[in-house]
Image (tube, rainbow, N blue to C red):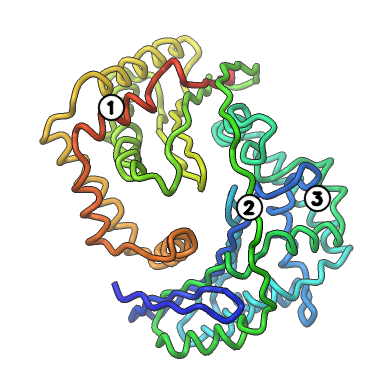
Amino acid sequence: MGYENFTLENGIRIIHLHSKSAVGHCGLIINAGSRDEEDHEHGMAHFIEHAIFKGTKKRKAYHILSRMDDVGGEINAYTSKEETTIHTSFLKNDYERAMELISDITFNSTFPGKEINREKEVIIEEINSYKDDPAELIFDDFEELIFKNQPLGKNILGNPKDLRRFTKKDIESFISKNYHTNEMVLCSIGDISFAKFKKFADKYFGHIKSNPRINERTQISNYMLELKTIKKKTYQTHCIIGNIAYNVHDSKKVAMTLLDNMLGGPGLNSRLSLLLREKHGYAYHVESNFSPYTDIGVFSIYFGTDKENFDKCIKLIKKEFENLKTKKLGIVQLKKAKRQLFGQIAISSENNASLMLSIGKSFLLFNKVDDLERIKEKIEAITVDDIQEIANEVLDIDKMSMLVYQ
């Protein structure tokens, strides 16, 4: 793929992939998320993601929302544990409009008191709606359990008590401490020349004052093995069982991704789906997840089942772990698993909006982007010994934490 990149004088990196599509996609990824919050800032990164849409030096909230909507485009944002991202999709002739708007709301927001107070109530409703969905809530509660009293363990949304205390000064303080220009990537896919994209980037982002990161973010100091059951009024028993795994820079990350995909990836033929759902009918939904962060990773299995089938599910999952630890995969099994994973990655790359965010994050973390050929090479290099070694390191039931809602 023909990625082109450049670094502005203030440290903001830009990366672009030309595509002959009528639709363009552009986003700004900032290496700052909920794990960068101090104790009194819980929920601040996500709150800022909302607050930047509430007014700038030259636009009111309505004009921000209408700017892309008026031309059939869209603008949105999201916050994760480690990133804040503002992204847009639009017709290719509206590139400048989109890039100017991203710059305006990111760097010129005024955080008007009336607007941000109203938005606090909106986020509190978001928190309440999240509490009504145990299949989502349990993931946050699990990381809070295993990373107790550490920034990575805190949920992204925050809590009503802290949210209501946030002021404009608090917002500006967090931005000053965490929105570093050398930790930002402006990424794009669309039918625009790199020279023109670079011109717009310099026009709307080049004047931003340099604010390089000096201090490293706080590293995870320990993993707490925990077994906890929480009583909830739910029809099903919800469970997460998991362990720490490899960080985003670890050489074992790709093989861990393959093992995760085999166990409980999106394919209906994943091992746990075939075992719990198809063979025994114990669960409607079962999945595994591997989340690599910059300094640590988390692997987990989630399932929901009737209370009387809970112990049976745990027994089957443990047995599957033991099989992967003690029995090497056959060559044909490994080949099929590799082909499935690469196929999923290749198909997802056809979605330009998702690909734009993917190349942006890769460039943010590694200052490079692997093309499909290089990704395939990495997957093909995985051996049966690699899978078994990782299974023994990560799927050790004696090192796994478990959280249950019942």
The location of residue 310, given as percent across then percent down, is 46, 14
The location of residue 90, given as percent across then percent down, is 50, 77
- The amino acid beneath tag 1 is Leu
**Separation of disc 2 and disc 3 at Cα?**
21 Å
Quadrant position of residue 51: bottom right
Q: Residues within 10 Å of mark 2 (few under 14, many from 20)?
A: many
Q: Is residue 177 above or below residue 384?
A: below
**Separation of disc 1 and disc 2 at Cα?**
36 Å
- The amino acid beneath tag 3 is Glu
**Image position of 329 (left or right of 389):** left
The location of residue 371, given as percent across then percent down, is 29, 64
Along the line of sight, which residue is nearer the eye, 40 or 249? Answer: 249
Kindly identify which residue carries mark 3: 121
Kindly identify which residue carries mark 1: 274
Q: Residue at x 58, y 81 (%)?
A: 9
Q: Is residue 228 above or below residue 43?
A: above
Kindly identify which residue carries mark 2: 33
Q: Residue furthest front?
A: 214
Q: Residue at x 50, y 26 (%)?
A: 240
Which mark is first along the chain, 2 or 1?
2
